[in-house]
Amino acid sequence: MPQKQYSADELGEKITGWSIPEYDKHERQRNWYIISAVVGLIFLIYSFSGGNFLFAAIIIIGALVIIIHDGQEPMNINFVITDEGLAVGKNFYSYDVIKDFSIVYKPRENVKNLYFEFKNVVRPRLSVPLKSMNPLPIRENLLKYLPEDLERTDQPLSEALAKMFKL
């Protein structure tokens, strides 16, 4: 099993680590909620008029998730790079299950992320904010264990859209 909960002796020697938020929390203004509610109502009317009750249920569940999720603050979790793999919170990923890594560092655009692609195409990419960390020593250490994807020069479209729409 590539992802597992780990014990301290399985981690290997710590290279570096820092604390990251569990997810990005966006500051949404009142207009965002008004526009989202109007769009949601339009979709609900469309789904009921077409008799597509499953779509209506998905819209309602999505709205509930956003409402519940907005009231919570993201927890800080530890991210650690070791000589055996990556520890993210309580999960450990061995270098054997990771395909490659890439660093997108554009401070002017407020993009400072470390990305890991997994060999299993079903598993989503792991995005780790670098915060105030210097990317050069991180890159040098990761190159000892993983190939670097030099073709990725921008953040993925999915992350850019999520940031733009504050999702």
Image (tube, rainbow, N blue to C red):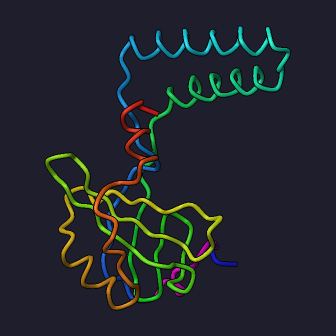
Please identify the quadrant where the N terminus is shown. bottom right
Q: Is residue 103 above or below residue 74?
A: below
- Quarter of the image for residue 48 reads top right
Q: Residue 50, position in %: x, y?
A: 81, 14
Residue in view at x 57 percent, y 80 percent: 97
**Nearer to me, 152 or 109:** 152
Judged left or right of residue 76, residue 92 is: right
Q: Residue 85, position in %: x, y?
A: 47, 82
Q: Is residue 99 above or below residue 102?
A: below
- Quarter of the image for residue 127 reads bottom left
Q: Residue 69, position in %: x, y?
A: 55, 31
Judged left or right of residue 152, residue 107 is: left
Residue in view at x 76 percent, y 20 percent: 56
Residue in view at x 29 percent, y 85 percent: 141
- Quarter of the image for residue 102 reads bottom left
Judged left or right of residue 72, residue 5 is: right
Residue in view at x 61 percent, y 15 percent: 40
**Nearer to me, 97 or 158:** 158
Report the residue that reaches farthest toward the bottom. Answer: 144
**Nearer to me, 68 or 66:** 66
Residues drawn in magenta: 4-12
Q: Is residue 8 magenta?
A: yes
**Numbered marks: total:** 0
Q: Is residue 133 magenta?
A: no
